[in-house]
Amino acid sequence: MRWFIEKPASLRITRRGLLKVFGVTVAALAVGAYKVTDLFVHRNRYIKMRQSGQYKDDERVRKTYSLAASQQNPMIKRFYDEFAGQPFGEVSESLLHTKYFRRTG
Amino acid sequence: MQGEIGVRHSIDYDMCINCGQCLINCPFGAIEQMSFLEDVMEKLNGGWTVVAIVAPAVRVAIAEEFGKPPGTLTVARLHAALKKAGFKVYENNFAADQTIMEEGTELIGRVAYWELGLKEIEFEITDSYPGSWRKKVRLELKEFENRPLPQFTSCCPAWVRYAELYYPEILPHISSCKSPQQMAGPTAKTYGALKVWKVSPEKVYTVGVMPCTAKIYEASRPEFNSAWRWLREKGLIPESVPPFRDVDAVLTTRDLAELFRRKGINPLEFSENENPEDFEWYSGGGTIFGTSGGVMEAAMRFAWSVLSGQEPPATSEEWDFVKVRGYTYPRVHASVTIPLKKELRKETGIDEVTLNVCVVNGIGFGGMHIKPVIEEVLAGTSRYHFIEVMTCPGGCLNGGGQPVEPMGTSWIDPVLPLPL
């Protein structure tokens, strides 16, 4: 009759070998985990990039056309002179203002 | 949105504010929007004056769809590409300027009535460059009885829906001004059609090009057919014309990129030089609407200049209200002191006004960033005069209609070896 006899663990892997494997695993995990934090830190970078794009446009418009504030826009002047009269005027009330509605209890 | 891990999730559409944050942040890209792409393509084939209302946040993101990094500014190139596709360009930034004229005036009215106790106020909006432009504004303040302080912005349709659904008591505080998109629509179909392009209003088809999914919902709100109502009232269109919408269709940034691809147009191939005309004009204040704090800064530029009478050169730093800009903080607070000009000092009897302002940069998960602000207002302890609310963190430029960024919060994507 043949019996299965388990080999002692020391014959399968040495103590040093085990430490090696563990060391490499921990190192791999640590680097990976660091990479994950990286993803969190940089995840919203694109918001800042797009925001800086907007302020670049602000700068561009002010530099090229000298338009910093809304009332300086030549088309705004035309719109109120030719059509709407004044802010909160009759035309504005009909076309540019609205009401809101309660949608729950 | 509800659902357990690993099980198909569901959205309660009755309580959804349509902001689209779930769409751009879904790690699996499982959520889709409805699209007007086919309708717009058909209308471009002829017979219609198709007007593209281009939002400020589109110009800093659409280049991403064509291989450029986020924040790449595309203005003249985008206009040229739109014209090539058959659109007329109506800058939503111009509509943002309209919004500021109306909303800034409203803010002055509310402060004059509630803080200064005036019965009426008269002031001049002036600009001395290049010619001299003056616009006298006279407000009867009696109707401001129903417009308490603080004033909330109304540009963000997801925020308006949030308020209507969850905090209806706050509605009188929200500015009665429509959002820029909804100002652009009726203006294009009245002033634009009759005086600028000289076409018949019912043949104008307005298309909002928006970074936002809530704008699709906003355009469909039943009350937004004001151009049709106004034109009929004035007898400018025949009685037989059936009702038409202020804004007929809305394309998101992604949709517009798809439209360009189908037409074989790459906006990046055009030149970045142009001479703006008609509705293509916009101010710096108009363009920063797309970022959190932008509406506030634009309103401050308006109010400060109108009330103090100062008009420094456009490049001057005096126009910068850096402290109201929203970057990474969920809420930004600031106080802006404005010295009054001589005529107003005489009229009101005070030397200066201080405006306390707050910018809510993303309403937060379940509204956690906006709730304390609203509770304070409802309790009557709020110290603010003006509160800007952007539902999406960072503002419109991070809206639900923008290109989905792999470097965004859907961070699982870059970790996977193969795309899902």
Image (cartoon, coloured by chain):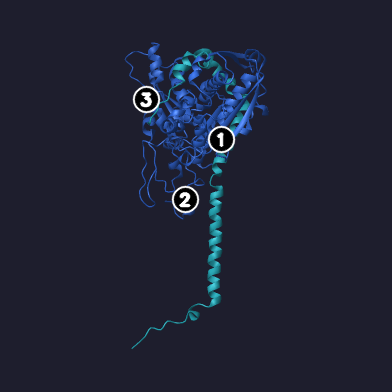
Q: Mark 3 lies on which chain?
A: B
In this view of the protein, can residue A17 be seen by the observer? Answer: yes
The residue lying at 36 percent from left, 44 percent from top is B10
Measured from the top left, where is residue B317 in percent x and y? 67, 29
Q: What residue type is labelled 2?
A: Asp
Please give the label number shown on residue B222: 3
The residue lying at 33 percent from left, 17 percent from top is B241
Q: Which chain carries label 1?
A: B
Separation of disc 3 and disc 1 at Cα? 35 Å
Sequence order check, earlier mark of 3 and 2: 3
The image shows residue B138, relative to residue B247, as above or below, that is above
Q: Mark 2 points at which residue?
A: B413
Sequence order check, earlier mark of 3 and 1: 1
- SS at badge 1: loop
Separation of disc 3 and disc 2 at Cα? 39 Å
User: Where is residue B327, by image quadrant?
Assistant: top right
Measured from the top left, where is residue A20 in percent x and y? 55, 71
Q: Mark 2 lies on which chain?
A: B
The number of callouts visible is 3
Q: Name the residue under label 1.
A: B73
Asked if both marks, 3 and 1, belong to the same chain, the answer given is yes
Q: Which amino acid does label 1 sit on?
A: Leu
Please give the label number shown on residue B409: none
Q: Which amino acid does label 3 sit on?
A: Pro
In this view of the protein, can residue B315 be seen by the observer? Answer: no
Crowding at dot 3, Cα within 10 Å, few <14 / some 14-19 / many 20+, comes out as few
- SS at badge 3: loop
Badge nearest the viewer, 3 or 2? 3
Q: Write down the colour of chain B.
A: blue
The residue lying at 56 percent from left, 25 percent from top is B282
